[in-house]
Amino acid sequence: MPELTHAAAPPLRVPQSVGEVFRIFNRMALQGFGGVLAVAQRELVERERWMDREQFLQSLSLSQVLPGPNIVNLALMVGDRFFGWRGAAAALGGMLCVPLLIVLLLAALYGQFMHLPSVAGALRGMGAVAAGLVIATALKLVGTLRGNPLGWRLGALFAALTFLAIGVWRWPMVGVVLGLGAASVATAWWRLQR
């Protein structure tokens, strides 16, 4: 029986200019209805190959514990990685410029039509789609737990505890990030020292 082999992943590439960074982050932002996180993983890891999954997960993890919107923090880190402050500014500009204009327009329209039941129903439907995008991204990234110092069992335990703490028990996110985040970092550090 022939042995199955996995094709090597294509090599990572570097964006050619600050303009390309702006363009890619603008494209991501314009696709990100309900959240840009799922789009960011697909664009940065699968389509553009600027990062591998592990690098994306590490950057995402850091962006989530910093103050401010996760995707903005991620854009700043990715842009800075390739072109320093100019890349960070280009990524941020791409992420915010055109979407800001669209949001302002939609906010004005919503102010005019928010009393209509169809508008309220549409917003509820978008909430379900946003939740689905977050779950899909999590499922795509779960494979990176194999190489994590915590291993898949402890990683899954911390993920489940985080879900329970925030989603079920309604604990404040800051406390959960500081408590469970610190515990997972300490556990990973301890396992690396052994």
Image: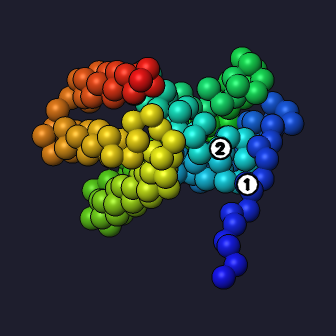
Say few, some or many: other residues with alpha carbon within 10 Å of mark 1 (under 14 / 14 to 19 / 20 or more).
few
Point out residue 36 in the picture as x, y percentages from the top left corner: 53, 46
| The furthest residue to the left | 169
Q: Which residue is mark 1?
A: 9
Q: Is residue 173 visible?
A: yes
Amino acid type of the residue tagged 2 in the rendering: Asp
Indicate left or right for 29 with 81 as reference: left
Q: Is residue 105 visible?
A: no
Q: Secondary structure at mark 1?
A: loop
Point out residue 79 in the picture as x, y percentages from the top left corner: 69, 28
Residues at badges 2 and 1 in contact (C-beta under 8 Å)? yes
- Which residue appears at 39% of the width and 59% of the height? 132
Q: Nearer the viewer, residue 110 or 15?
A: 15
- Which residue appears at 34% of the width and 26% of the height? 187
Quadrant of the snapshot with the N terminus: bottom right
- Which residue appears at 78% of the width and 23% of the height? 83
Relative vertical location of residue 193 with respect to residue 123 in this rendering, above or below: above
Task: Find residue 59 and report its image quarter.
Answer: top right
Relative vertical location of residue 24 with respect to residue 178 in this rendering, above or below: below
Point out residue 121 in the picture as x, y percentages from the top left corner: 30, 64
Relative vertical location of residue 78 with respect to residue 53 in this rendering, above or below: above
Quadrant of the snapshot with the C terminus: top left
Relative vertical location of residue 185 with respect to residue 160 in this rendering, above or below: above
Sequence-first tag of 2 and 1: 1
Q: Which residue is mark 2?
A: 52
Amino acid type of the residue tagged 1 in the rendering: Ala
User: Which label belongs to residue 162?
Assistant: none
